[in-house]
Amino acid sequence: MESKAVQSASRFDVAKWLVVFVLIAAGVVGNQYFSAESVLYRVLALVGLGIVAVLIALQTGRGRRFAQLLKEARVELRKVVWPTRPELIQTTMIVVVFVLVLALVLWGMDSLISWLVAGFIG
């Protein structure tokens, strides 16, 4: 019984995704077709079509799973301990100094190798 419900839901999901892709295609073609119109109107139409397409996509199984993933990611982001401003500045300065030192070392090695090759080739 449950497999029939999953099958019918997946059939409707395919139709919903087809509608989403048609809306996106209509937006692209309509934007090109109405290229003489004001950019404001075209952007508003594209935003409207995009919102409708997203709302339809969220009604599918994959769309619901994606929305759940976004909710879980938001919860995880709240758990992150962000560095303070002094920690951020200190870490950034360490990275900048390390990059400069490494750049100087590579420049020195390149100069040495180029001097050796020029001396060897003559």
Image (cartoon, grey):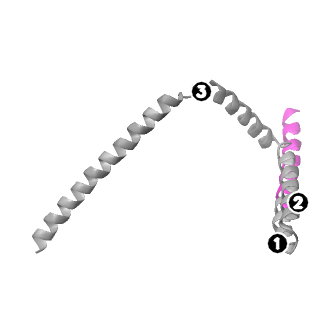
Q: Which residue carries the number 3 mark?
A: 80
Quadrant of residue 91 in the image? top left
Label 1 sits on a secondary structure element that is helix
- The relative height of residue 8 versus residue 88 in the rendered view (above or below) is below
The mark that comes first in sequence, 3 or 2, is 2
Residue for point 34% across, 42% down: 98
- Per the image, the residue denoted by label 1 is 32
Q: Amino acid at mark 1?
A: Gln
Q: Residues within 10 Å of mark 1 (few under 14, many from 20)?
A: few
Q: Quadrant of residue 19?
A: bottom right
Q: Any magenta on residue 84? A: no
> Relative to 65, is 4 on the left or the right?
right
Q: Secondary structure at mark 3?
A: loop
Counting labels gives 3
Residue 108, label in figure: none
Q: Which residues are magenta?
A: 1-22
Closest to the observer: 4 or 62?
62
Location of residue 48 in the rendering, given as x and y in whole percent from the top left corner: 88, 54
- The residues bearing labels 3 and 1 have C-alpha atoms spaced at a distance of 44 Å
Residue plotted at (27% across, 56% down):
107
Residue bearing mark 2:
45
Magenta span: helix, strand or loop, mainly?
helix
Between discs 3 and 1, the one toward the N terminus: 1
Q: CA distance from mark 3 to mark 2?
A: 38 Å
Disc 3 residue crowd, few under 14, some 14–19, many 20+, Cα 10 Å: few
